[in-house]
Image (tube, grey):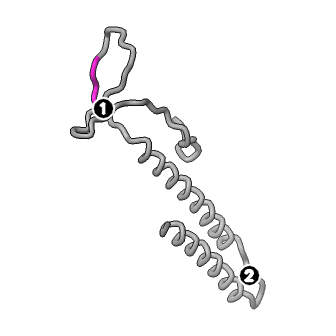
Amino acid sequence: MTDDSTKDFSNPDTIKAWQCIGCGRLEAPANCIGVCQDRKVELVSAWDYAEVAVALEDAQQRGVALASLLGRLAHTTPREGTFKDSYLALQEQARKLLARDAASESK
C-alpha cells in the first residue's frame, strides 16, 4: 500500500470524455474488444482534483511548519532567568505561522 503523504498527486491518470450539459451523462471513446460490461464508477472532475491537490500540498507544508515549531517548543530549555523571553519568542513564531495561514486562506 502506498503512503498517501508521499504520493505524487500532481499528475493523475485522466481520460477525455464528453459530458451532457443537461443530464451530466459521460461518454468516452474506447476500443471495444467485444466483452464490455458496464460498471458503476465514481468520477471527480480534473479541476476539482487539482484544487484538492493544491490544498493537500498547502496542508502538508503547514504541518511541517507547525511540527517544526512544536519541536522547538518541546526541545528548548531556557537558560536560568530567560523563560519569559523564550516563551515570548516561541509565541511570536506561532503568531507568524498563524498569520501566514490566515493570509493564505483569505486568497
Q: Which residue sits furthest bottom?
A: 81
Closer to the camera in the image, 98 or 71: 98
Is 75 rendered above or below residue 63? below
Of marks 1 and 2, which one's residue comes earlier in the chain?
A: 1
Circle 2: residue type: Pro
Magenta span of residues: 37-41
Closer to the camera in the image, 19 or 37: 19
x and y percent of residue 45 in the render? 39, 42
Residue under pointer 2: 78
Q: Are marks 1 and 2 in contact (CB under 8 Å)?
A: no
> Which labelled disc corresponds to residue 26?
1
Magenta-colored segment: predominant secondary structure: loop
Q: Quadrant of residue 29?
A: top left
| Residue depicted at 43% across the width and 30% down the height | 15
Circle 1: residue type: Leu
Q: Residues within 10 Å of mark 2 (few under 14, many from 20)?
A: few
Q: Which residue sits furthest top?
A: 34
Q: Name the secondary structure under disc 2.
A: loop
